[in-house]
Image (cartoon, rainbow, N blue to C red):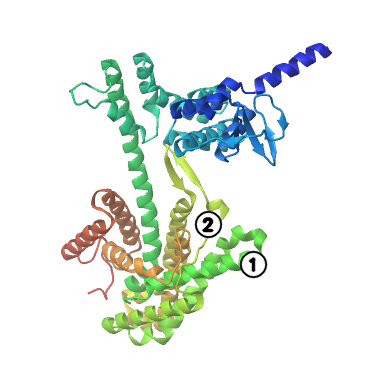
Amino acid sequence: MLLVGCFCLHSVAAMAAIEASVLAPLAGDDADARIDTIGKIAALATPEAQAVLQAIKDDALYATPNGTLVIVKDEQAYNPVSGKTGAIPEGADGIIVNNRLRGAVEASLSGFSLFSPDASLRMKAALELQDSIDPALLELVHKAFQKEKNSDIKAVLQQLISTVNLQSTNPLVRQTAVLSLADSTNAKLTPILQHMLEKNTDGSYIETNQSVRLAVISTLKAIQGRQWRTELLGNLFYGVSLGSVLLLAALGLAITFGLMGIINMAHGELLMIGAYTTYVCQRVFITYFPGAVDAYLIAALPAAFIVTATVGIALERTVIRWLYGRPLETLLATWGISLMLMQLVRTLFGAQNVEVANPSWMSGGVTVLGSLVLSYNRIFIIIFAMLVVFAVWLILNKTRLGLFVRAVTQNRRMAGCIGVSTGRIDMMTFGLGSGIAGLGGVALSQLGNVGPDLGQGYIVDSFMVVVLGGVGQLLGTVIAAFGLGEVNKFLEPFAGAVMAKILILAFIIIFIQRRPQGLFAQKGRSVE
């Protein structure tokens, strides 16, 4: 039994070591031979092979005068062939590592992650290799494919193998590889396959085999069809996401402008105040409740509503209440207020943008159709926007405040005659619209950095949504927000972001000329 054990240990050691003939070209001057050697070393997929590649990357691989290669570390020399460690041989000199060799080494080292016990690291390594797979790593990928148990990772590895096999000299292997790539979601395969259908200068096809060319055409149709469906779903999702942002930004304005007739140019700054309130809540949790920092967003929602509603009520009581029925003066006054609010924020927080990080439960996303990622923060904003709309509908239609608001909107004089305090209702309505703008600011803080100019980018879009949907119409605001979001996202790929906004603005101008009341007309005796 001792004899058998010794033989087993000997065989393990022999498998672990690297043959001297495999390493020998690294000490030579033939660049191609050295690159091929990197592939052979990587194909061994052993810790010793990884150590040699890491040594090349770290400039720690030395060659002795007799051609022996050693890894030098901490004034000691390790021989990967014999597995022994000793003093650094006299005359040992570092091997020359150029950019080409270093690139091959880095690609091979990333390939070793395919054997990691962590499935997420294996998937990450496989996806990274999709960007530029070296044919020299084919054997390494084959070994990883044979050992892999995860079906998703195995599918990616199979695509890697097929991508390399596109360069095979055997037409049957190429055809099989092309057909197996029909289910691929890697967009970088399209130019590779299209290149196979191109012609040389003499008129002959680059891909000489007709059966392979037919397979390429079939695979290209499948890949392009899948890409079209992915882009369509992506545009739909991001259109709904943009519509949700526009809805949150315009919903408060639909109340202050739609129901009260106040042209509030400071509405964008109310969004900005809501976003900065979120930032303050995040800093408070980081400082005083670091263990519950992911809960800062839950505290930020009521805080932003209360802060912005308070600011809105203060504006209405001090400035706007004296300007009812005077739209030009209201516009100028609220524009001046917006400048004051921006300067106040610059004084308190500085002119630079501040970062509001997503909670961990909002980080990441859902992958659909292989390559489209639906981010959790945008999904949350879509759901949040729907909940806010539902809450506003309940307030306006199922509460005493909503009844008074609708009464004042439809006939202010009659409402006042039956005992409704119209001034108090104006204050509460403006506070409600301002608070909803603060909630919109919370949502905006989850999509990017927060700065003093945050609201300026949404004030025009908000007015467009309210005017298009119909002044004072909640349903119209919802339809207009999502409609503009979808149209904008589908126009951007063809016309660009700036031209898309110009086309949308032109459409709204023409639409309002034909239908001044918007999608849904306002009702009431006071409607002119």
Towards the viewer: 473 or 416:
473
Residue at x 32% of width, y 42% of height:
232
Where is the C terminus found, in terms of image quarters?
Answer: bottom left
Q: Is residue 62 visible in the rendered structure shown here? A: yes
Towards the viewer: 194 or 232:
194
Callout 1 secondary element: helix
From this view, report whether residue 364 is shown above or below residue 62: below
Q: Quadrant of residue 194?
A: top left
Residue 244 in picture, x, y percent from top left: 39, 57
Residue at x 23% of width, y 57% of height:
499
Towards the viewer: 467 or 295:
295
Q: Earlier in the sequence, mark 1 or mark 2?
A: 1
Residue 397 in picture, x, y percent from top left: 42, 65
Q: Amino acid at mark 2?
A: Asn
Name the residue carrying label 1.
Answer: 287
Q: Is residue 515 left or right of residue 290?
A: left
Name the residue carrying label 2.
Answer: 358
Residue at x 31% of width, y 37% of height:
228
From this view, report whether residue 341 is shown above or below residue 444: below
